[in-house]
Image: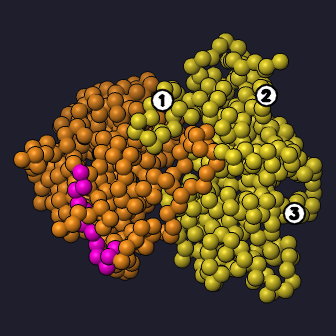
Chain colours: A yellow, B orange
Amino acid sequence: MLAHLQRRIRIHEMDNLLLQVTNLKEYFPIRGGILNRTLGYVRAVDGVSFYLKRGESLGIVGESGCGKSTTARAVLRLIEPTEGEILFEGNNILSLPKKELRNLRRDMQIIFQDPYASLDPRRCVGQIIAEPLNVYDVFSNKIEKQDRIAYLLDKVGLHPEDSRRYPHEFSGGQRQRIGIARALAINPKLIIGDEPVSALDVSIQAQIINLLEDIQEDFGLSYIIIAHDLAVVEHICDRIAVMYLGKIVESAPDVELYSNPKHPYTQALLSAVPIADPDHQNERIILKGDVPSPITPPPGCHFHTRCSVRKDICAVEVPELLDIGGEHYVACHLISSPS
Amino acid sequence: MRRDTRMQDAILDIKDLRTYFYTFDGVGRAVDGISYRLSDGEALGIVGESGCGKSVSALSILRLIPDPPGRIVGGQIFFNGMNLLELTNNQMRKIRGNHVSMIFQEPMTSLNPVFTVGNQIAEAFRIHQGLERSEAIEKSIDMLRLVNIPSPEKRVDQYPHELSGGMRQRIMIAMALACRPEILIADEPTTALDVTIQAQIIDLMLQLKEELGMAIILITHDLGIIAKTVERVIVMYAGKIVEEASTRTIFREPAHPYTRGLMQAMPRLGDKIKLGRVRLAEIPGVVPSLYDLPAGCSFSTRCPSVMAVCKKEEPELQEMDDRHFCRCWLTCKEG
C-alpha cells in the first residue's frame, strides 16, 4: 500500500501534463449507392477529452465497438481525427505538418494486441527492432546499434542471440516481448498498449504485465493501456477511463473507480466481471440488450436505452463530464457536481 | 462401496482417453490418458492454457477429431453405460446434438451464413425427432424464447449476420439445447463476448441447466467464470489432468504447483483496494511443445519446487482427500 501511495505522490508532484486531448472526434463515413455518396457516419469516437501526466498509466476500458482502440490510434494520428485537439507536451499534433509529426512520433510508440500479426515474418528480430533506430538515424555506428539491440532484448527478457531468429520461432508471449523491445528502441515518452496482453495465456500474461511495470520504472514511461479486461487495467493503471459508445462516461483514479463507481454503466461493468473466488457474492447487475449501433446512437445519454435508473431528461440531453472532486469525472444526469 | 454408487451416478465416464495427432513434426499427444466422471446434472469445469488439450478432450467425446491428422488411439468413453468409441458413425450421429451437444467459442464461424437461424435450429428437430418443417419452426421459436431472444417470431427468419455476437451465442445455445440433451459441452462459450454480454450468457446457461436438469462440461481459461459456475474443476497441463477437486478446494487449497501458480498469476478485480500495488507472481518459461515434452513431469521445467525425481519419473494422479486428485511428487503418498 505504501509503495502505491508513494507512486501516486510522485506522479502528482510532477504534475505536468504529457498529453491533453480535448473533444476528440473520429467519424468514419459510410459510402454507398452508385455515386458513392456519403450516406452517414460511424461515430466511433464522439467527443472524448482526457489528459495524461508524466509517469502515469491511464487505462481505457469498455466493450468492443466503444471506440477505445480508435481513440488510441487517433491520438497517434495513425488515423486522421475528424475534430478535436491533441496536445503532446504543448504541441498540437493535429496542426503539425507531416515532417514535424514524424519527429514527434519518436516520443510515442504503440504495442499491438496480436503478437502474430504485428511482426514482419520475413525479417529477423534484430531487423525488426532496428527499424525505428534506422528511421530516426539514431546510430551511424553498426556496433553501437547492435549493442543497443542486445541491451533491449536483455531488458525484455530475451537473449541477445535471439536477434538472428525469426518471429515464427517464438511463442506468443515472446513475440509480445519483441514488440515491446521495438517500442522501446528509441526511448519514447509515451507507449500506447492496445490490448497488450489479451491474446496471451494467464501465466504468460502475468510475465508481460510485470515486464510493462518494470520498464515503466526503468525508462520513465507513461502508458495508455487499452483493454477490455478490467482486472488487468486495475493492476497496471493509476487512472481509468470507462468508454461507452464513443464517449467517456466516467474516469477516476484506480481505487476510487473500483470502490466508488458512480455511473450506472461502470457499476454494471464492474459487477459483471466474474471474480475468481467461489465465496465471493456480489449483487450482479445484468444489463439488458446489446450496445446500440454507433451509426445511429440514441439521443441524449447514449447509455439510457440500457440504463435501469434513467429519467426523462436522459433521453433528451447529453450529460456533461462533470468533475466531482479528486480527479473523478462522471457523465450522468443523476450525478450533480459537489459545488 | 462408495465407489460403486459413484459409478452409477456417472452419466459420462471417461477412462484413459488418448487422442494423438500424427504430423510431420512427430506424434503430438494432445490428450494423453485422461479419466474423469461427470455425474447427472453436474457442472464440471476444465481449465488450462492454450494447447493443454482441453478442447481436444471435449471434441473426442463427440468424436469430432479431424482424422487425419488426429486419432483417438485409446481409452473408453461411457455415456449411460455405452462406449461411444465403439459406436458406428450412424449411431454416433444419433448421439450428437440429441444426447450430447456442444457450443463453440466463435458463434459466427459455427453458424451457417446462408440459412436462417430458424432453419438451423429446426434441423435438430427434423433430424432427431422427425418433425415436419412448420412444426420444427414453431418449436424453434419456442427455443428462441427460452434463450431470451426478444421478438422470436421475427428473429427466426433472420440470418446470422443480422445478429450481434451475444445474440448469435444465444442461437448456438438454442440449437444445442433443442433436443434437451443430457450433456452440454461448452467450449469457451463467452471468450469472444464482452463482459456484460458474458454475464448474460453465463446466467442463461446456469438457469437452463436448472430448468432442463442437464450436465455441463465448461471449458475455459478464465478462472473467474469457473468460480462462478461449476461445482468441480479439472486442471489440465500438456495433455494430462494435473489436479481435480471441488471448486472450493481448487480455490482454497490448490495442491499442484501449476494450479497454485495460475491462481497467483491472475490479477483479480479489487485486489488493489485490499493489497495495494503488488507484483504478480509469474510462472517462469513457456508451456512446452507437445512434440517435445520434458522427461518426467511435464511441468518440471517451470515448477518452483522441482525435485530430482520430477525430472526422471512421471507422477501418478493420486487421490489425496475425498475426490481431490493431484498429479505431483510433492503430494504423493508413500507406498
Dot 2 falls on which chain? A
Q: Which residue is mark 1?
A: A282
Q: Report which residue position mark 2 lands on.
A: A325
Residue B56 versus residue B227 in the image, above or below:
below
Question: Depth-wise, is mark 2 or mark 3 nearer the camera?
Answer: 2
Q: Label 3 belongs to which residue?
A: A102
Residue A20: percent from left, percent from top: 85, 44
**How packed is label 2: few (under 14 Cα within 10 Å), some, or many (20 or more)?**
few
Q: Amino acid at mark 3?
A: Arg
Badge 1 or badge 3: first in the primary sequence: 3
Secondary structure beneath label 1: loop
Looking at the image, which residue is at 44% across and 31% down? A281
> Are marks 1 and 3 in one subunit?
yes
Q: Is the C-beta separation of discs 1 and 3 under 8 Å?
A: no
Give the Cα separation between the discs numbered 1 and 3. 49 Å
Q: What span is colored magenta in the figure?
A: B309-321
Disc 1 marks which amino acid?
Answer: Asn
Residue A67 among magenta residues: no
Height in image: A126 above or below B141?
Answer: below
Task: Kindly report the distance in space between the C-alpha atoms of the residues bearing marks 1 and 2.
Answer: 27 Å
Q: Is residue B314 magenta?
A: yes
Quadrant for residue A124, please give it: bottom right
Point 62% across, 25% down: residue: A264
Q: How many labels sit on residues?
A: 3
* A156 or A138: nearer the viewer: A156
Q: Is residue B182 left or right of residue B163?
A: left
